[in-house]
Image (spheres, grey):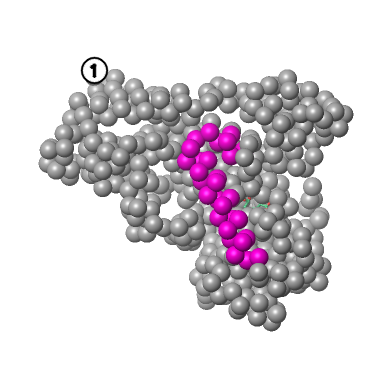
Amino acid sequence: METEGSFGSLLRWAADHGISDSVDQQTSHSCLGHSLCICFFPDAGGRGLGAVRQLNKGELVLRVPKSVLLTTQGLSLEDEKLAMALKGYPSLSSTQKLTFCLLYEIGKGTSSWWFPYLKHLPQSYDILATFGDFEKQALQVDYAIWATEKAALKSRMEWGGVKGLMQESNIKNQLQTFKAWLWASATISSRTLYVPWDEAGCLCPVGDLFNYAAPEGESLDVMDVSSFSPHVSLNGDMTTDELHEEKRDTPWALTDGGFEENVSAYCFYARESYKKGEQVLLSYGTYSNLELLEYYGFLLQENPNEKVFIPIEHDIYSSSSWPKESLYIHQNGNPSFALLSALRLWATHPNKRRGVGHLAYAGSQLSIKNEILVMQWLSKKCHTVLNDLPTSVEEDNQLLCNISKVQDLQVTRELRKVLLAYGGEFCAFLETNGLVNSDDAEVHISRKLKRSLERWKLAVQWRLLYKKALVDCISYCTRTICSLSS
Ligand SMILES: C[S@@+](CC[C@H](N)C(=O)[O-])C[C@H]1O[C@@H](n2cnc3c(N)ncnc32)[C@H](O)[C@@H]1O
C-alpha cells in the first residue's frame, strides 16, 4: 500500500509546477501541508485529502494551474506527433481522445513529464464496465443488469474506434488491449473534472484526490430538479455521457470547485467547515447509486439522490406527462413527487383526469379513495418485485457478512473450504473464478480474486439497498393507508 511518504515525489513535482493549498504561494518541497494532507479513510473512499487545520466554509483550499491540468489540448501542444495522429481521427469523441492520450502518455514511461502524477493513479477500478458476468448477475435487478451490459458494450465500441489510431501511433502492445482501455476509460470516468473547453474534462493532479460527498439539501423532491432539467426529454434522447457531464456542470459542483478563467486555475473551496483531521470532500454532482457505480465504482449507504425504479405499466406512463426517469422511489421508501402524482392520475377515471390534472401536478391528494388505491397498488408492486428477486434482504445481509469475513481472512490456506462451507452464491463465485477443482493449498487471495470479491460485494450492496427501499416503501404505504382509514 502507498504510504504518506511515497507521495513525496508527486507533492514536490506539484509544488514545482504551482499547485498549492496555500493562498500565499511560497516555494516549498510539498504543495500540501498548509490546508490539506493526503490521508487514508478506510470507510469513505480510501486515499483522500484531510484537513491539517480548522478550515472554514468557503475557504480556498487548493489551486491547480491550467498548465498542470492534463487535457487532450495540453498534451497535443506538447507533442507534435500526438497532435498529428489525432488529426487523422476527427470523428472520435472527446472522451475517446483523452483516453487514448492517457495511454499514449503512459507509454512514455518514466520519460513522461507527467510521470510523477501518472505513477500514483489507481491500478484498477470497479466501475460497472469492469463487472464480469457473475458480478453483473449479482445485481439481480433488470435495469441494473442492462446498465452494466450497456456500459461494457460502450467501452468495447469506443475501444474499437481507437484501434487504428493506437496501431498507427505505435504504442506498446499491452497498452492497446481492451484491458488497458478499460483501465484508462475508468480513470477518465472517475477522475476527470469539468472544464469549459473540453467535453471530456481534465485530469487534475492532487485535485483528483478529493473523495465524494453527495450534495445535500438540493434534492428536495418537490423541486425534482432532474426531471425539470431542460435536457432530459420524455423519450430520454440524452446520452449517458451528456448526462454525466451535465450533472458535473451543475451549480452545486461549482460551490466547491471549478475552473476559474481570471486566475487560469482549478480552484477548490471548502464546501463546509472542517475540523483538523476530518476528510475534506468534494461534490462531483448528483448521482444515484447505480450512476455512482457506473461512473465511479462505488456507492453510498446513504445517498440523498438515490432513485429506485420499479416496473411501471405503459398505461401509468401515458396517463400523465411526467418523464419516466422522474417516477422512482427515494432511498427512505417515499415515492417521488412525480410518481405519486402519476399514480393519482392513473387511479382516476380517464374521463375525470383533465378536471383534476392541476391538483395532481401540484402534488395534492385527489381523494381518500384515490390515495388508498394508489398506496395499495404501490405496496403490491413492491411486494411482487421483492418476491420475484432470487434472494431476500436477510439473505443478502448474511451474504455481505460472509464476503467481508472472506476479505478479512488472514490465513488463506483453507480458503476454498471456507468458501464452499458458505455454499449458495459462494459456490458460483468459486466456479466463476476457476477455483472449484484447485487444491486448498493453492488457493490464495490473489489481487484478481480480491477485485472479484470487491465487485461482487458492491453488486450485493447495491441490490440490498434497492430491496430495503422497497421494504420501506411498503411501510410508507401501510402507514398512509392506516392514517387515511382512521
Ligand atoms: C477522484 S477519485 C478520489 C480519490 C481516490 N480515493 C484515490 O485514491 O485516488 C474518485 C474515486 O475515489 C473513490 N471514492 C470517492 N469518494 C468515495 C466515497 N465517498 N466512498 C467510496 N469511494 C469513494 C472511488 O473509487 C472513486 O472512483
Which percent across, then down, holds residue 452?
69, 39
Q: Residue at x 85, y 28 (%)?
A: 439
Disc 1: which residue: 486
**In the displayed structure, would residue 251 be above or below residue 170?**
above
Boundaries of the magenta span: 135-163
Which quadrant, please, contains the C terminus? top left
Dominant secondary structure (helix, strand or loop) of the stretch shown in magenta: helix
Which percent across, then down, holds residue 183?
68, 55
Q: Residue at x 79, y 51 (%)?
A: 2
Residue 370, image quadrant: top left
Q: Residue at x 65, y 69 (%)?
A: 164
**In the displayed structure, would residue 441 be above or below residue 323?**
above
Residue 410, image quadrant: top right
Which percent across, then down, holds residue 13?
76, 68
Of residues 430 and 52, the one nearer the viewer is 430
Q: Residue at x 37, y 34 (%)?
A: 334
Taking the image as shown, residue 152 lies to the left or right of residue 315, namely right
Q: Secondary structure at mark 1?
A: loop
Kindly identify the amino acid type of the residue bearing the numbered disc 1: Ser
